[in-house]
């Protein structure tokens, strides 16, 4: 392909990679993005981005070409000068995710931990596709989840006192848990999640008995935790991840609310559909609730008991055409906005100058986009906006999500 920027488009439709998982929910994906399931597991995620494991393709005159290859050929066109110099790649990965059953209990590494872990596994010669491979890249993975439907997750530790009350005297004695200080929770997690096979049966029975008792509690939080434990016991028998609802906060998000998960926070998405945006990484260290590779020792090494997730409520700006919701997070690699344009808007369009590369996802209505060329963005479709694009105008009505990378958007 020619690297002449004049011949490269500013806008192009995306063809996105589908990820099928045991926990997925195809029907939770389809209202928000076009996707087609192959044989096997339901669709769990649709990836929009350039991650080497499953890059999107741009629909160009020359055919559908992988975004990661296009960026390598002409980084300054597709990323813009600033992002090309700072990141050398698309700095974010954008997803639609739908959980029909709980995802694995997991943590994500810091940037230093990711680089060290990736280098170690490369030296060991572990193939990227190997089931026991943990670090798929050398990047960290701070992430923001925004609820498209009511959404439930576990994230971060409950207080030690709350954990003691939920476990009850018998389980506290079994684990010698006496309301440890937060910094001692790491060793407690290692103890619980390292129990395997027949040795776990006694704890599993005790957990079931305790949870059945908590179903009759006067506390709604205790009943909620108990019901989730029993659900997990039916979904993941003999898995110590069943203890998760008694150890970790249960969070219930309404549509439009966000959850930011930094490195070191143990978490699991339980049910519902979300948009997810993160640094461009697929590094996940798992402890339970999964058929995938588990590394309890590594997870406990990078676990940060004091780290907390953050509930993110968008900041709204009102205009004559509708509203813009901005999801502010500490991450420098990405930013997410939602533009809602009214059908009876007096405005003839929304114009702005991209601050870097963008992915636009329309989930309702439809838009006509104009830059150096024009493009129709219908509901359940997405497109890529090159970072070198000087100006873009959106005309239409509905809802479009704007994922941008590498700093503040305009």
Image: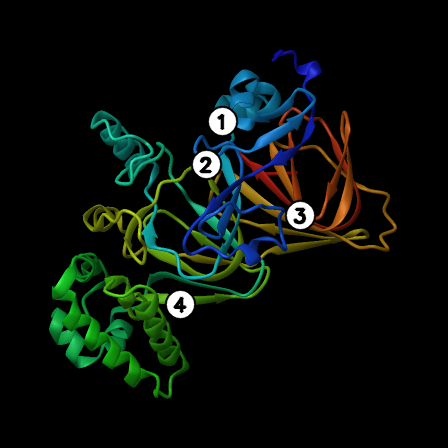
Where is residue 283, by image quadrant? top left
* Between discs 1 and 2, the one toward the N terminus: 1
Between the residue at mark 2 and the residue at mark 4, the CA separation in whole angstroms equals 27 Å
Quarter the C terminus occupies: top right
Question: Which numbered disc covers residue 250?
Answer: 4
In this picture, is 176 found above or below 153? Answer: below
Residue ID for mark 1: 89
Whether residue 178 can be seen here:
no
Q: Position of residue 238 (x, y in %)?
A: 23, 64
Whether residue 207 can be seen here:
yes
Instruction: For mark 1, give the secondary structure.
Output: loop
Please give the name of the residue rendered at 46% of the width and 47% of the height, measured from the top-left corner. Answer: 20
Between the residue at mark 3 and the residue at mark 4, the CA separation in whole angstroms equals 30 Å
In this picture, is 400 found above or below 124? Answer: below
* Between discs 3 and 4, the one toward the N terminus: 4
Residue ID for mark 3: 380
Please give the name of the residue rendered at 37% of the width and 76% of the height, measured from the top-left corner. Answer: 227
In this picture, is 205 found above or below 198? Answer: below
Q: Where is residue 399 in the image (x, y as percent from the top left)?
A: 70, 51
Would residue 74 appear left or right of 393 to someone viewing this image?
left
Confirm or deny contact between disc 1 and disc 2 (CB under 8 A). Answer: yes
Residue ID for mark 2: 280
Quarter the N terminus occupies: top right
Between the residue at mark 1 and the residue at mark 4, the CA separation in whole angstroms equals 35 Å
Please give the name of the residue rendered at 37% of the width and 80% of the height, measured from the top-left corner. Answer: 223
Q: Which of 28 and 216 is in front in this view?
A: 28
């Amino acid at each position: 392909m020619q690297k002449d920027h004049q011949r490269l488009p500013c806008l192009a439709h995306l063809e996105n990679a589908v990820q099928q998982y045991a926990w997925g929910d195809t029907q939770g994906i389809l209202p928000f993005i076009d996707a087609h399931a192959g044989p096997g597991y339901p669709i769990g995620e649709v990836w929009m981005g350039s991650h080497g494991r499953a890059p999107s393709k741009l629909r160009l005159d020359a055919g559908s070409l992988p975004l990661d290859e296009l960026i390598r050929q002409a980084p300054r066109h597709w990323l813009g000068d600033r992002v090309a110099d700072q990141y050398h790649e698309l700095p974010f990965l954008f997803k639609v995710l739908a959980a029909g059953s709980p995802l694995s209990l997991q943590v994500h590494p810091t940037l230093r931990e990711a680089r060290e872990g990736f280098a170690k596994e490369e030296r060991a010669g572990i193939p990227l596709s190997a089931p026991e491979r943990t670090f798929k890249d050398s990047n960290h993975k701070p992430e923001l989840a925004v609820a498209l439907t009511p959404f439930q997750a576990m994230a971060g530790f409950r207080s030690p006192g709350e954990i003691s009350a939920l476990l009850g005297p018998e389980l506290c004695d079994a684990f010698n848990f006496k309301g440890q200080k937060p910094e001692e929770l790491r060793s407690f997690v290692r103890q619980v999640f390292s129990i395997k096979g027949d040795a776990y049966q006694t704890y599993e029975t005790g957990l079931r008995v305790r949870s059945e008792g908590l179903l009759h509690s006067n506390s709604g939080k205790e009943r909620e935790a108990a019901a989730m434990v029993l659900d997990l016991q039916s979904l993941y028998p003999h898995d110590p991840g069943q203890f998760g609802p008694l150890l970790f906060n249960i969070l219930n998000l309404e549509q439009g609310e966000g959850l930011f998960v930094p490195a070191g926070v143990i978490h699991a998405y339980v049910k519902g559909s979300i948009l997810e945006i993160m640094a461009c990484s697929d590094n996940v260290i798992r402890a339970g609730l999964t058929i995938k590779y588990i590394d309890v020792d590594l997870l406990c090494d990078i676990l940060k008991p004091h780290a907390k997730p953050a509930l993110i409520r968008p900041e709204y700006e009102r205009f004559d055409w509708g509203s813009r919701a901005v999801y502010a997070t500490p991450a420098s690699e990405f930013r997410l906005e939602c533009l809602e344009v009214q059908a009876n808007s007096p405005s003839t369009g929304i114009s702005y100058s991209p601050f870097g590369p963008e992915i636009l996802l329309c989930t309702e209505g439809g838009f006509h986009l104009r830059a150096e060329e024009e493009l129709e963005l219908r509901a359940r479709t997405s497109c890529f906006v090159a970072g070198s694009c000087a100006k873009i105008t959106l005309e239409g009505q509905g809802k479009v999500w704007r994922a941008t990378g590498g700093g503040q958007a305009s």
